[in-house]
Image (cartoon, rainbow, N blue to C red):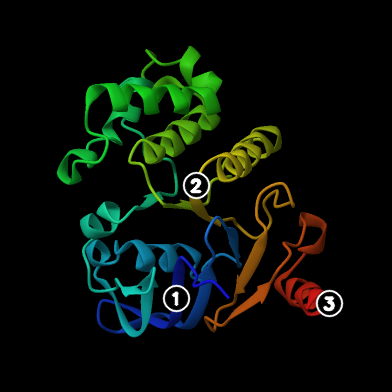
Amino acid sequence: MASPLLSVNGIEVIYHHVILVLKGVSLTVPERGIVALLGANGAGKTTTLRAISNLLRDERGEVTKGSIELRGEAVQSMTAYDLVQRGVVQVMEGRRCFAHLTVEENLLTGAYSRGATGRGKSRGEIDADLDKVYAFFPRLKQRQQSQAGYTSGGEQQMTAIGRALMARPSMILLDEPSMGLAPQVVEEIFSIVSDLNKTTTKAYDVVFPMLAGVGDTAARAAFVIDKSGVVQYSEQTPTPKDLPNFEAVKAVLAKLK
């Protein structure tokens, strides 16, 4: 069996040295995989992603137990900058575009980190990658000179994903990509994520809120996390009708095993 791209092994996360948020969370992401992390509000989905991308320190959080490995290398003690250089890029919850910059300027900020490693830092290579982003998100091509703050929620989410792609990642962590978006826009974004995974060499770890439009158009496997921090695994993603509550999720996963 091939080694996973990402392996999270029994991690525990504590905030402010006293608040236990995660306990015993384990999950894996295979090469070229799309994985959904499901759970109720407050279950720890965002914290899990921040632990992987090493963004916990900014909120006085830390991984106190367990390990996180990328291609077999322990990364939990690295900085977020180190992780970006290794190809792990997170799209934060709420899009977080630079509102005063144009859509294209936002996309170009994603290429900033490439200069430090020398990978694809020439203007020609950056322009080529920009064209690829526009090919996946034609709507952004139409809005490229618009200020990001005046675009729709769906366009901002596309901008945030496109900005991550400009960093040439090997893994993208998408935190709540469907939040606040119309169902039709959510379906469009999930479809694009699936197309990206099929037509490039990248792998994606995709995190959805529990009751969002999760279907088999995007994720190919699911981990379900509850308040105890224990993650359960399924090689098939439950659909929204299977998710009226968390106990139902566990029942569905039991049937799929």
Q: Are marks 2 and 1 in contact (CB under 8 Å)?
A: no
Q: Which residue is mark 1?
A: 8
Q: Residues within 10 Å of mark 1 (few under 14, many from 20)?
A: many
The percent coordinates of residue 149 (x first, y second) are 38, 25
Q: Residue at x 66, y 39 (%)?
A: 191
Depicted 108 relative to depicted 70: above or below: above
In front: label 2 or label 1: 2
Residues at marks 2 and 1, CA–CA distance in whole angstroms? 22 Å
Relative placement, left or right, of 22 versus 2 is: left
The percent coordinates of residue 52 (x first, y second) are 38, 66
Q: Secondary structure at mark 3?
A: helix
**Residue type for callout 3:** Lys
**Residue type for callout 2:** Thr
Q: Is residue 65 visible?
A: yes
Relative placement, left or right, of 52 versus 253 is: left
Q: Residue at x 72, y 61 (%)?
A: 237
Q: Earlier in the sequence, mark 3 or mark 1?
A: 1
Q: Which residue is mark 2?
A: 201
Q: Residues within 10 Å of mark 2 (few under 14, many from 20)?
A: few
Dot label at residue 85: none
Relative placement, left or right, of 194 versus 97 is: right
Q: How many marks?
A: 3
Dot label at residue 255: 3
Q: Earlier in the sequence, mark 2 or mark 3?
A: 2
